[in-house]
Amino acid sequence: MSQTPAPARAPEPLDPRAPRRGDLWIALGLALVTFAALALTESSVGFPRDEGYYFRAGHDYAGWYVDLWEALKRGQPLDAFKDAAIVRRFEYNHEHPVLMKSLFGLSHLLFTEKLGWLRDAAGYRLPAWAVSGFISALIFLLGARLVSRRGGFFAAAAFWLTPRNFFHGHLACFDMPMVWAWLLVVYCYWRALSNRRWALWTGVAYGVALAVKHNSWIIPGVLLIHFLLAEAPKAWREGRGRGLAKALAPFWAMATIGPALFYLHWPYLWHKPIERFVWYANFHGKHINYPWEYLGTLLVEAPFPVGYAFVVSALTVPIALFLLMACGSLREIARFAGTWIHRPLQRFVSPLDTDSLLLLGNAFASLVVFSMPFVPIFGGVKHWMPAMPFLAILAARALEQVVGTTEGLLPAARRAAFPGLAGIVLLPGLLGLVQNHPYGTSFYNELAGGHAGAATLGMHRQYWSNNVTGVLPWINEHAPRNARVFFHEVNWDSFLAYKKAKMLRDDIQYAGSPQDSVLAAYQYMPEFRDVEMQIWNSYGTQTPVHGLYLDETPQVVVYQRPPRG
Amino acid sequence: MLSKTHSAEPLSDQSSPAVEPAPAVEPAPAVEPLSAGEPVLAQDPRWRLTRTWLLRAQAALVIGAALLSLLFYFCLPSTLPSEADYQQLAESLASQASRGDAVLLDPHWAERARLYVKGIPVLNFGRDPTREDLAAFHRLFVLSAPELPRSDREETFERLEAMKFRRAGEPTRFGKLSLALFESSAVETPSFDFTSEVAQARVFIRRADGSEELCPRSGERHPCKRAGWLNVGAEIKEIAFKPYRCLWAHPVGTEPLVVEYTGVPLGKELRVLAGIVGQIAFRTERYQPVTLAVKVDGELVTSLVVPPGEPGERRSTVGTERFAGGRHKVSFEVSTPDASMRHFCFDAGVYP
């Protein structure tokens, strides 16, 4: 019998950084799984203060597109482009660019208002889940090339099984979109290192990043350092000035397409670009710091502790995963040192390759910036979350090393070694996530001792007020009709969102102070301790009636004004 | 050239093949290194052995941490007190407690107990209570959740013993909670409490020309006409996370806000406490110090200065034996160069 020869397989792509066969499908699958996981767990996640603002902003901005449509129908499209028409819709919350807020608003307009498919908040949040899905895809695509395919899987899972990351993935805010945008820029730049067509996409991606949040201002610096250390000498050797100019293509694109897209995406800048951009830049350049508890000290003003971001990460990323990140990072740092700082180290470590340098730079850029004593530290991990995908990939590399070691010890278990060890490393994150959800800002890892250990250490217990969802069912059940409730850190927009989401009774009213209320939901934060005492003074009691206690730590404490007499 | 496929140079060191993913399973990606080569000692058997042990140590560290993390999550539920534990403890406490007692929480933040413990003060003076904070109590019931992560009941006990409290017997267990009684033989309560007696005080602003602008009494408070926050009265206020019952006395500015008591029976000591309330105490930016001047019959006996950015209560003890036996006029004068955000509170007492 003669065998039919197998059809010739398509050749692997020549570009060493291009996805291999099937990788794009896997990436798409991961994106869909991530999207579904966030969508299915979203309804219990409360509305943080910022999200309330962005709901409102999204609604306003989507209104401009409705205005434009109406103006088009009237045959007077230019009406919508007048500054007054733009300011009317875009004046609110103009301290941030509008890409994500516009997407939030348009998604709400389509999926909630027009189609009625999603509840109110979910309509706004959907774009955030979509970009979160892209994060999984991008981590996998990078990881599959820089580590291994299974390493790419692991890195994507590791990113999401970090409970604080998972929490932020749900929200109609900018933090997870910034992770996505940063990753996208780096991915495009990385591809451009071996395929110059990607230089153009690097510029586009950077425009998107600028349109997401100002963290993007850091990215060119990181890439430039990488370029100067790794790519520029090679380009110079190969083509002198001309070679250098060609190799700089991603930067030319970022410098031109980026700002152009930024300007175009934000109608508020169209008529007064300089004046309004300067205001925007100044706003963030002079942003005050909100108080933040750190190892028993309330940090309110610079200088902040050097290394803050590293310590907080060590206490909030599941510790086994954190150690893998640390091992993976230390190895690359040693290679970096051997290559650039202390040549004799090359006796022990191999020279650093260009891709590892890129990983290392992006893994540490945000962490280093937020460890500077003069950089405001409020917001905790979300501000350096763009580092996490790169740290997850470095962790995947370290895991491969661990697997390699154990494979040598247990040859019989060779096939099971990677999934088994990956499972052991990721399972604590999953347990922490399940135990903590939906109170994402309260999560602390096993090293901290969970919620209780972190409280004893004096770490910031929560922020943003979304933990109030833990007491809303009690308030709905027990509040008198038309009760005025002091919700403390819950702002007006979030209060309205709870009502629209049917998480809060319609008749309950918003009280601006304890004195004006019959019920108070105090959210424990050290900087607000006096607010609880104001409630004690006003209500004449220090005995709460209900509370949200995570592993005994008070998060939200409900007081009720005793009846008179 | 950028578009070329680069020569196959693995990402990682190749000096120890055992630690790399098997090429048959996952071919190493082809990426160009900055410079070719491998560690100088790659082929050195001693270094290879050292490296193998280092990698094994890394594996042990990570796997060990992961297993301990799993253990943490499996054990955590068994460390947490139940509602029944709190209820049983509260019942026991209600049957033992009497006037002059208080409950001290351990760890200090474990305030879920407030839901259950009634009729007896529940104290949380943060992580650093002082002797003065606890001096008014004959007995302290230390309510501990000793099995919580990072809980350290023995340290709490030692701290109390260092503050002249004596442990009366072994702690009683209520499930995951414990209750330990501490007694003090050095109770100090004021014979005259200025905060409690604020209704009898005369409050006024002393203008630059020396005239007085009265803040007339209204119920238990003394509101001044100038602004809503100029409203002297007794409240529980937070000074560096500790709750104090004190007199809210927001300064006016350079014109002193005066809280004046007449006919005060002075004794051995006059003790004063003062501080800036709330988080603003931690900020230095553009804020000014507040001065509290204490006068007896017009004579300055002490003054406390509370500077910006230095949170925490300030205390002063003045010997007043020379005034003992008679009744005197005691006045407290609060002033600052700039009253912006100077949320000020003070407390004072006469000790016999």
Image (cartoon, coloured by chain):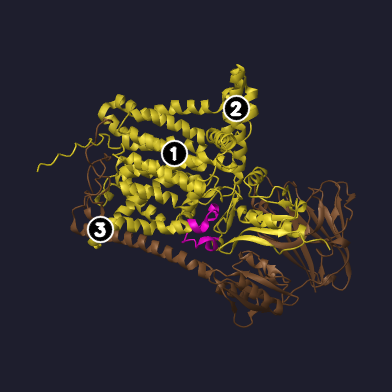
Task: Look at discs 3 and 2 and give the one toward the viewer.
Answer: 2
Chain for numbered disc 3: A
**Residue B5 to residue A563: above or below:** above
Query: What letter labels the chain drawn in yellow?
Result: A
Q: Which residue is mark 1?
A: A182
- Percent across and percent down for residue B94 are 71, 76
Determine whether the residue tagged by mark 1 lies in a helix, strand or loop. helix
Q: Is residue B314 left or right of residue B6?
A: right
**Residue A118 to residue B82: above or below:** above
- Percent across and percent down for residue A440 are 53, 52
Badge 3, how many Cα within 10 Å: few under 14, some, many 20+? some
Q: Which residue is mark 3?
A: A414
Chain for numbered disc 1: A
- Percent across and percent down for residue A166 are 48, 49
Chain for numbered disc 2: A
Q: Is residue A44 left or right of residue B313?
A: left
Is residue A24 covered in magenta?
A: no
Badge 2, how many Cα within 10 Å: few under 14, some, many 20+? some
The numbered mark at residue A38 is none
Query: What letter labels the chain drawn in brown?
Result: B
- Percent across and percent down for residue B146 are 55, 72
Find the residue positioned furthest to the bottom: B169
**Residue A246 to residue A231: above or below:** above
